[in-house]
Amino acid sequence: MMEKFMTIVVPSIPDTLYMVFFSSLFSMVVGIPLALVLIVTRPEGLNPKPKLYQVLDTIINTLRSFPFVILIMVVYPLSKLLVNKTIGPTAAIVPLTVAAIPFVARIMEGVFLEVDDGLIEAAKAMGSTNGQILTKVILPESLPAIINAMTMTIINIIGYSAMAGMLGGGGLGEIATRYGHFRNELDILWMSVICIIVIVQLVQWIGNRLALKTNKK
């Protein structure tokens, strides 16, 4: 069993971490600014633009409605265009990112809306610009919640990566499917599952520690 673990399961762990890391990074880079645009342009926001908000809100809701397995198939042409591949960990990063961006945007929007309105009004009274309110009030005050939201996002992407592996994305999901399902080697299946659980627990532990350290309350 140990030989199987070292020769089959362990080599697939870097592929999973690779997919999760870059998908998380790209989804945060796009999703967090998108969330800031949402809170600024919402009808009661800092710079209300209801039509723009409605368009973005509809796009986000539409993308979030797609089951991930179907989304992978829909985004295959984009993977081919961007990375010239439709299988493997690099190709899987594209649908993973596309799936995660609307999730990040929506969850971060909720995080930013939790900031005390009194702080925002005080900043306005002091003559702060919208950009200053975002960077010096909303983002700093939301930092612990942002870290918790990022942790939740990464854990979701880990789950998505396992599904991507079932469709040729590589990583632990592919190993679990190829050996555990098609070859009925249940020991490899359970070793893959345990590895995924360990990764999730580690991400959650790190996220909790960082959120606790940044919490000023």
Image (cartoon, grey):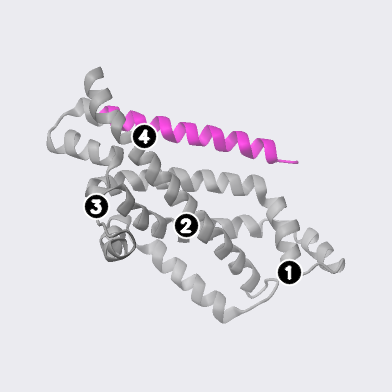
In this rendering, the answer to whether 126 lies above or below 2 is below
Quadrant position of residue 123: bottom right
Which range of residues does the magenta coloring cover? 190-217
Asked whether residue 106 is in view, the answer is no
Crowding at dot 1, Cα within 10 Å, few <14 / some 14-19 / many 20+, comes out as some
Cα distance in 3D space between marks 2 and 1: 24 Å
Q: Earlier in the sequence, mark 2 or mark 1?
A: 2
Which numbered disc, 2 or 3, marks the residue closer to the eye? 3
Q: What amino acid type is highlighted by mark number 4?
A: Ile
Q: Earlier in the sequence, mark 2 or mark 4?
A: 2
Q: Residue furthest left?
A: 183
Cα distance in 3D space between marks 2 and 3: 24 Å
Cα distance in 3D space between marks 3 and 1: 43 Å
* Residue for badge 3: 87
Q: Residue furthest front?
A: 84
Q: What amino acid type is highlighted by mark number 1?
A: Asn
Residue 89 percent across, percent down from the top left? 31, 47
Residue 21 percent across, percent down from the top left? 44, 45
In percent of the image, x 65 and y 60: which residue is there? Answer: 113
In percent of the image, x 45 and y 43: which residue is there? Answer: 155
* Residue for badge 2: 103
Q: Earlier in the sequence, mark 4 or mark 1?
A: 1
Q: At numbered mark 4, what does the secondary structure look like: helix, strand or loop?
A: helix
In percent of the image, x 47 and y 57: which residue is there? Answer: 103
Q: Which mark is residue 42?
A: none
* Residue for badge 1: 130
Q: Is residue 106 left or right of residue 94?
A: right
Q: At numbered mark 1, what does the secondary structure look like: helix, strand or loop?
A: helix
Q: What amino acid type is highlighted by mark number 2?
A: Phe
